[in-house]
Image (tube, grey):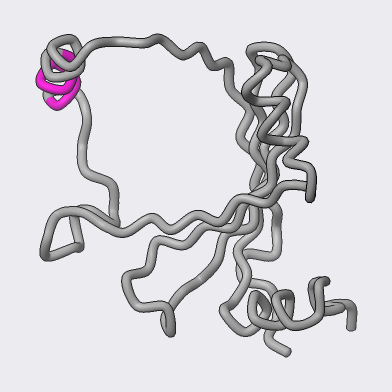
Amino acid sequence: MSSRIGQSKKSNRRFELKYRINIMQYNKLKIILKTYLKEDYFTATSEEKRYYVRSLYYDTYDYAIYHEKMSGDSERIKFRLRTYSKEVSQAIVRVEMKVRMAETLEKLGVLVSLEEYQYFLRNGHWPDTKS
């Protein structure tokens, strides 16, 4: 089994508020922000100037995570797998756990190989990476 890609786990903690805006506000904001933002590596190196995002979210059989979100619970946890690769055979998968505590959001994640992800799908757990 291959070793973990990016051995150190990455954590991002931020303060987050969300606002609803209409399409006119969105277009105006998009134009304003474009002058301050630069393309990330993936967009800059892509022929189409965009890239794929594929996400798989996990929940319980009774959709507890979905119901927590819809009821506005301010403390909740969400699990997802995400890849940015157009070709599945070349995918590196990011495994993430998002923890929300009121307006504070923390994302913990690690990159795993496609081989490790397929092992997880077959066995229901991640391979033992201890040597």
Quadrant (top left/top right/bottom left/bottom right) for the C terminus: bottom right
Residue 47 location, quadrant: bottom left
Image point 68% across, 73% down: which residue? 4
Total numbered badges shown on the rendered structure = 0
Relative to 92, is 22 above or below?
Answer: above
Q: Is residue 96 left or right of residue 34?
A: right
Q: Is residue 70 left or right of residue 54?
A: right
Q: Is residue 87 left or right of residue 28?
A: right
Q: Is residue 51 left or right of residue 1?
A: left
Viewer-proximal residue among 109 and 38: 109
Q: Is residue 32 magenta?
A: yes
Q: Residue furthest front?
A: 62
Q: Is residue 9 magenta?
A: no
Tell me residue 53's x, y (percent). 38, 55
Tell me residue 119's x, y (percent). 72, 82
Relative to 20, is 99 above or below?
Answer: below
Image point 32% across, 59% down: which residue? 52
Relative to 89, is 71 above or below?
Answer: above
Q: Majority secondary structure of the magenta segment?
A: helix
Residue 125 location, quadrant: bottom right
Image point 35% across, 78% down: which residue? 87
Tell me residue 38's x, y (percent). 20, 37
Viewer-proximal residue among 103 and 60: 60
Quadrant (top left/top right/bottom left/bottom right) for the N terminus: bottom right
Range covered by the magenta-colored residues: 29-34
Q: Residue furthest bottom?
A: 1
